[in-house]
Image (tube, helix red, strand yellow):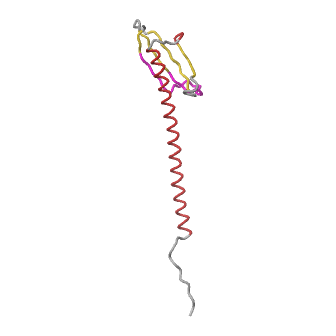
Amino acid sequence: MLNRRRHSKNGFTLLEVMISLAILAIALVALLSANNRALTLNHEASRLTDAVTIAREEMEKMFLGILPEDDTRKKIKKGEFPGLRWKATAVETKIEGVLEAQVLVFNATDRNERPIVTLKSYITKK
C-alpha cells in the first residue's frame, strides 16, 4: 500500500494570512488618520482658547479705564501666547461719554489681517 500523508486542517493558509494583513493595514491607516485629525483639532482649539483669553484680558483692561493710546494699541505678546498679536481700539460713539471698544486677535504669521477672534463692547468714560 501507498503511504499517504494526512494533511491537517490546523492553521491558516498563506492567502488567509495575506487577506487578514490587508484588512489590518486598511484599519490601521484609518485609525492613524483619525488620530492625526484629532491632534490637529486639539491644536486649533488651543489656539482659539488663547485668542479668546487675550481678547478678554484686553477688554477687561478697557473696562478698568486703561484705554489704548492714540485710540489704537497693537501688540505682540511673547511668551504667554506665542504667535498671536492683537489690535485694541476704543473710539467715540454718537452718544456722549460712550466708547466702542473692540479687540481683534490675529495669527502673527497671517498677513491677510483676518482675525481669529473679534470682541466688541461699549464702555463709558470715567
Residue 66: % across, % down: 48, 12
Is residue 54 shown left or right of residue 79? left
- In the image as oriented, which residue stretches furthest toward the top? 96
Of residues 78 and 75, the one drawn nearer to the viewer in this rendering: 78
The total of numbered circles placed on residues is: 0
Residue located at (50% from left, 27% from top): 51
* Vertical order, 52 against 21 (above or below): above
Viewport quadrant of the N terminus? bottom right
Q: Is 77 inside the magenta-drawn segment?
A: no
Quarter assignment of residue 81: top right
- In the image as oriented, which residue stretches furthest toward the bottom? 1
Viewport quadrant of the C terminus? top left
Residue located at (53% from left, 21% from top): 86
Of residues 108 and 61, the one drawn nearer to the viewer in this rendering: 61
Residue located at (56% from left, 69% from top): 14
Residue 9: % across, % down: 50, 76
- In the image as oriented, which residue stretches furthest toward the front? 79
Magenta span: 104-121
Residue 20: % across, % down: 52, 63
Quarter assignment of residue 96: top left
Residue located at (51% from left, 43% from top): 37
- In the image as oriented, which residue stretches furthest toward the left? 95
